[in-house]
Image (cartoon, rainbow, N blue to C red):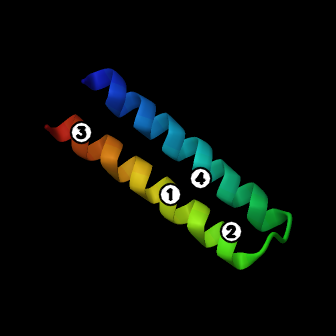
Amino acid sequence: MNGVSTLLIVVGLFLAGGVYSFHKQQMPRGVVVLLAIGSAMCLLAGVLRLEV
């Protein structure tokens, strides 16, 4: 299951880049917050799957 963990971490980092980009473009705060939460969840799930 190491491939799934890697995929979740990559998706989380991609979403984190989206958070930065959306913040720079002055997008609505709600969109940035939702994207940040999604990014954190993907990164956390990927790291926790690495531990198992």
- The quadrant of the picture occupied by the C terminus is top left
Q: Residues within 10 Å of mark 1 (few under 14, many from 20)?
A: some
- Residue plotted at (50% across, 57% down): 38
- Read off the residue under disc 4: 16
- The quadrant of the picture occupied by the N terminus is top left
Mark nearest the camera among 4 and 1 is 1
Looking at the picture, how far across and down is residue 27, in whole percent? 81, 69
Q: Nearer the viewer, residue 20 or 35?
A: 35
Q: Is residue 16 left or right of residue 49?
A: right
Compared with 49, 41 (above or below) is below
Q: Residues within 10 Å of mark 4 (few under 14, many from 20)?
A: many
Q: Residues within 10 Å of mark 2 (few under 14, many from 20)?
A: few
- Read off the residue under disc 2: 31
- Read off the residue under disc 3: 49
Three-letter code, disc 4: Ala
Precedes in sequence: disc 2 or disc 3: 2
